[in-house]
Amino acid sequence: MTVSRVLRNRGDVSAKTRERVLAAAKALGYVPNKIAGALASQRVNLVGVIIPSLGNMVFPQVLSSISEVLDKTPLQPVIGVTNYLPERE
């Protein structure tokens, strides 16, 4: 419970305990999973991105830029590729 409170930045945890938990998380290479966190909190925080193709070099660049911007937010991209089929859009 204490680790969860520290990693989610919630609850009353002493500064000393918080430092120990964060140091252990860093040593273990802990990286928060945004999708798992969204499911646990019952908030979606997903952004749908639909592109026509991955073969055209411009679209992967667009996806990379979108991902870079969303990394600074609690939002997570979900990608769909239509293969230029209007019925999949």
Image (cartoon, rainbow, N blue to C red):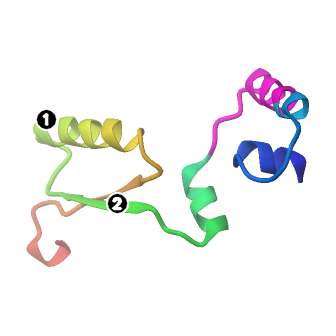
SS at mark 2?
strand
The answer to whether residue 41 is magenta is no
Mark 2 residue type: Val
Where residue 13 is drawn, which disc sits there? none
Q: Is residue 28 magenta?
A: yes
Q: Nearer the viewer, residue 8 or 87?
A: 8
Q: Which residue is tagged 2? A: 47
Determine the residue positioned at 74% across, 24% down.
Answer: 26
Residue 30: which quarter of the image?
Answer: top right
Of all residues shown, which one is farthest toward the bottom? 87
- Location of residue 1 with respect to 38 vertically, above or below: above
Residue 7 occupies quadrant: top right
Residue type, mark 1 in image: Met
Residue found at x 90% / y 33%: 17
Q: Residue at x 61, y 66 (%)?
A: 39
Question: Residue at the location (19% across, 41% down)?
Answer: 62
Characterize the local packing of mark 1: few (<14), some (14-19) or many (20 or more) Cα atoms within 10 angstroms.
few
Residue 53 is left or right of residue 3, and the answer is left
Q: Is residue 62 left or right of residue 16?
A: left
Residues shaded magenta: 19-32
Position in image of residue 74 (x %, y %): 47, 50
